[in-house]
Image: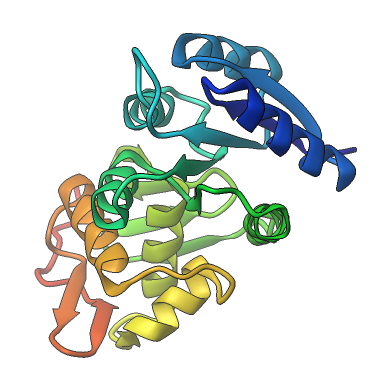
């Protein structure tokens, strides 16, 4: 079964270029010209990946991404921003919103296809398993972190980052190791990418799970003893 991609962009020419090159590679493509239409089509077709333009009239890409990530059932869909904006702003704002990657304008078809294939490969289903440690349970099949009686659904990259750290408690993961494991070598991102994701995880899970090792990286290390309910 072909992977499906929803292209949300207000420029018809851009949609045509993206759709043409992706269909040549065997993808099924769908198009929406604005955010409202994109959200409606997302709910109808449930695509594997969304290519989302950042700058659009009305509802912009950042706002659309935030809405998608807050909607139950849409945590696993991949979101790739299409942007011509300044790299620092768009990357940080997009990561905060839950984006998985970026493609810069002007579009280079070979780069486009390579980035999309890399995203989809890394998102392929893995063996269903749970990682259980004091304080947290990582459910890899549902992208859910269970903290006590609470189930917290994280965006894909946040989930993959905490799952990596919890896989080896008290082991320090260096920044380049985290980048290569979570984002892959085919995608160029900076150290700020990791920091943004760690901050978002701490906002949702609390500060008691991820320890910063200055100048090196991060580790999963429970900072205080949790009392089990009687």
- Quarter of the image with the N terminus in it: top right
For the question of whether residue 1 can be seen, the reply is yes
Q: Residue at position x 57%, y 36% from top?
A: 51
In the picture provided, is 171 more to the left or to the right than 22?
Answer: left
Query: Where is residue 43 shown, x and y percent of the image?
Result: 59, 15
Between 212 and 179, the one nearer to me in the picture: 179
Between 201 and 225, the one nearer to me in the picture: 201
Q: Residue at position x 37%, y 23% from top?
A: 67
Q: Residue at position x 58%, y 34% from top?
A: 50
Q: Is residue 68 above or below residue 20?
A: above
Q: Residue at position x 72%, y 29% from top?
A: 16
Query: Where is residue 216 shown, x and y percent of the image?
Result: 23, 90
Q: Is residue 198 above or below residue 212?
A: above
Between 60 and 127, the one nearer to me in the picture: 60
In the picture provided, is 100 more to the left or to the right than 152?
Answer: right
In the picture provided, is 158 more to the left or to the right than 4?
Answer: left
Q: Is residue 128 above or below residue 64?
A: below
Query: Where is residue 116 shown, x and y percent of the image?
Result: 66, 52
Corner quadrant of residue 72: top left
Corner quadrant of residue 2: top right
Between 218 and 128, the one nearer to me in the picture: 218
For the question of whether residue 147 can be seen, the reply is no
Query: Where is residue 132 shown, x and y percent of the image?
Result: 42, 63
> How many numbered marks does the figure carry?
0
Describe the colour scheme in one phrase.
rainbow
């Amino acid at each position: 079964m072909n992977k499906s991609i929803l292209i949300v962009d207000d420029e018809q020419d851009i949609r045509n270029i993206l759709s043409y090159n992706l269909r040549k590679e065997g993808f099924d493509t769908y198009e929406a010209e604005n955010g409202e239409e994109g959200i409606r089509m997302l709910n109808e077709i449930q695509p594997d990946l969304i290519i989302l333009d950042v700058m659009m009239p009305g509802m912009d890409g950042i706002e659309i991404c935030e809405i998608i990530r807050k909607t139950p059932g849409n945590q696993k869909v991949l979101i790739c921003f299409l942007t011509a904006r300044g790299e620092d702003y768009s990357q940080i704002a997009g990561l905060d919103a839950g984006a998985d990657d970026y493609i810069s304008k002007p579009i280079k078809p070979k780069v486009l296809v390579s980035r999309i294939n890399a995203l989809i490969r890394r998102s392929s289903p893995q063996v269903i398993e749970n990682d259980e440690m004091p304080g947290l349970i990582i459910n890899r099949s549902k992208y859910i972190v269970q903290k006590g009686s609470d189930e917290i659904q994280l965006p894909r990259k946040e989930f993959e980052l905490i799952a990596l750290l919890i896989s080896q408690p008290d082991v320090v993961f260096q920044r380049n190791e985290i980048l290569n494991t979570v984002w892959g070598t085919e995608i160029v991102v900076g150290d700020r990418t990791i920091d943004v994701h760690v901050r978002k995880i701490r906002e949702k899970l609390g500060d008691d799970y991820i320890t910063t090792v200055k100048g090196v990286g991060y580790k999963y290390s429970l900072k205080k003893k949790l009392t089990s309910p009687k």
